[in-house]
Amino acid sequence: MALQSIQKGRASTPVEPNLIDYDGTCSSFSWERAQKEELDGLPAGGLNIAHEAVDRHAASLRAEHLAIRWLGRKGSSRDLTYGELSQLSNRFANVLRELGVREGDRVFILTGRIPELYVAALGTLKMRCVLCPLFSAFGPEPIQARLSRGEATVLVTTPALYRKKVEAIRSQVSSLRHVLLVAPQSGEPIPEGTMNLGSLMEAARVAYTIPLTDPEAPALLHFTSGTTGLPKGAVHVHQAVLAHHVTGRFALDLHPDDVFWCTADPGWVTGTSYGIISPLSNGVTCIVDEAEFDAERWYSILQDQGVTVWYTAPTAVRMLMRAGPELPKRFDLSRLRLIASVGEPLNPEAVVWGQEVLGLPIHDNWWQTETGGIMIANYASMEIRPGSMGRPLPGVEAAVVRSEEGGSLEVIEEPDVQGELALRSGWPSMFRAYLHDEERYRKCFAGDWYLTGDLARRDADGYFWFVGRADDVIKSAGHLVGPFEVESALMEHPAVAEVGVIGKPDAVVGEVVKAFIALKPGQQPGEDLRLELLGFARKRLGAAVAPKEIDFVKSVPKNRAGKIMRRLLKARELGLPEGDTSTLEDDA
Ligand code: ATP
Ligand code: MG
């Protein structure tokens, strides 16, 4: 079906960025004032994410504005206005209420990116239950582990996913009381012990009033990506919506008429904070694509839907780069105004590629499941330094710190010195707990500071540069080598599509730098190319930092959030157990 374009005419009138005077805004910014000016507050009292994201728009002149345009895998589509989304999520909240589900109960969603996911997510928040979306590509074990650890009360899923992945493990999740199935075929019998969500929704009342919501009440449970180890369950509260909203305005530069596409699945925190809450709170139109990555499909979505702001991830950018520069020339991408990326370091090469091939640079930004929202960003109005994560958000204080003996911290004021990236605690979307792991939570803080576990440096102009995860940094012959620097240098070679770099234990130098390289289509691995790449890296990085060994691989293992799993490369190299691989992509 040919879809009508959402936005007529291109954004040829320049859009003035929301954040122009960075320094001035930083010095005058206060979260309290932002809350008063930018959010509504719940009529019943307190603060509720779903009210800010949907109901306040539904009660305004924007009720008819398109909130979500869903694009089905096979070409169908569905539009939901703010008014419709408000009513449907009301119905879902009433479904929960009728079932006797109570405030604080955990509602898990395992569906893939379908409209019901968005309706159920918002309805869950309205009921003051805790929302936990899961990747539908997870196998039974990771699903069981998360449902059990999260003490799920309700699971929303599809008949196919239920049969394939849940039925066999259900008895192991003792807390699970209700399984609601989306859209079983009419007449199709549903498995025992499940309910038809469609029928429940039809029978549910449309009217629903969100009860008073404590801003500190838990709202979201997100498991981390499992890049460095067993995924941790981070708990966020309703107050987080303030950060979601403000970061959407400042870092993603959302304006009311934007058509915004966040490519992340809500099973990863990015797909909830920026695939649901932040854009809706800012009242824009969200594109939701049910299908997986496909370069041609993605370019046609950008064109046909008139996407103006696009939020994606380095791994997707690398895949587009791999698909070549000719493909995008067939599409009109002129409505795009801002491209942003998160999740992994964005190689400088990718920033430059964006400018050359798409006509716009890619704005890197940094955050974590634990921070709930963007903390450091390259803003629309600011000069981009390719390879830098940008500068802290107004209202967020970031520093490079060094841990001292006895647990105290020294803030490193001197520029260009490497240390741990820390944030002064207290921003609204800061996680409030690691599920069942109080001690680990406590260990993340030293005095006022939250320690991120990432290493970084800050330059003299206040831009932050990612060095590596503390767990990934390589110690070689007295040097500390960040794998990202090595990977980025190798990415500049025209034959290279993907790189993962690790430290391989060595009796003489501690660790040697070893690179695993996947080549672009048409490139042949071989001794000549290996020597060429070793030389290429040495020229750029110097002998101390350049890899000593290179292995060619078909693809570099990544998790479902698209992140390179270096710990897995290392375990495989050393013949050690692979550890938790629940988040690993299928073909990795
Ligand atoms: P786990 O904590 O389970 O090992 P994870 O850290 O990958 O997984 P996430 O919370 O999804 O889980 O990812 C946050 C991390 O991703 C950051 O701490 C950082 O290491 C990396 N990251 C995110 N954005 C960027 C960026 N722009 N540049 C560099 N690294 C980034
Ligand atoms: Mg982490």
Image (cartoon, rainbow, N blue to C red):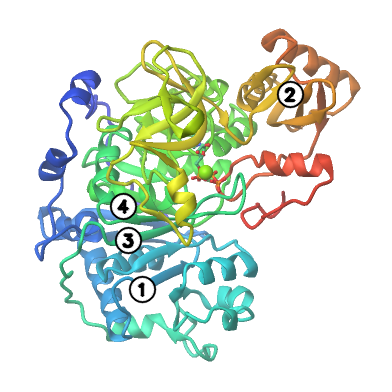
- Which mark's residue is nearer the viewer, 2 or 1? 1
Q: Is residue 20 left or right of residue 71?
A: left
Task: Name the residue type under label 1.
Answer: Asp
Task: Name the residue type under label 3.
Answer: Ala
The image's mark for residue 105 is: 1
> Which is nearer the N-term, disc 1 or disc 3?
1
Task: Name the residue type under label 4.
Answer: Ile
The image's mark for residue 446 is: none
> Which is nearer the N-term, disc 2 or disc 4?
4
Looking at the picture, does residue 134 appear above or below residue 319? below
> Which is nearer the N-term, disc 1 or disc 4?
1
Task: Give SS at disc 3.
Answer: strand
Task: Name the residue type under label 2.
Answer: Ala
- Comparing 431 with 532, the one in front is 431
Q: Residues within 10 Å of mark 4 (few under 14, many from 20)?
A: many
> Which is nearer the N-term, disc 3 or disc 4?
3
Q: Where on the picture, by quarter, is residue 30?
A: top left
Circles 1, 4 touching at the beta carbon (< 8 Å): no
Instruction: Tell me the distance, in whole angstroms, between the alpha carbons under discs 1 and 3.
Output: 10 Å
For label 2, the residue is 495
Q: Is residue 415 left or right of residue 253?
A: right
- Which mark's residue is nearer the viewer, 3 or 2? 3
Would residue 492 be visible to someone looking at this image?
Answer: no
For label 4, the residue is 277
Task: Give SS at disc 2.
Answer: loop
Instruction: Tell me the distance, in whole angstroms, between the alpha carbons under discs 2 and 1.
Output: 51 Å
Instruction: Tell me the distance, in whole angstroms, between the alpha carbons under discs 3 and 4.
Output: 12 Å
Residue 91: give x, y in percent of width and height.
Answer: 26, 76
The image's mark for residue 219 is: 3
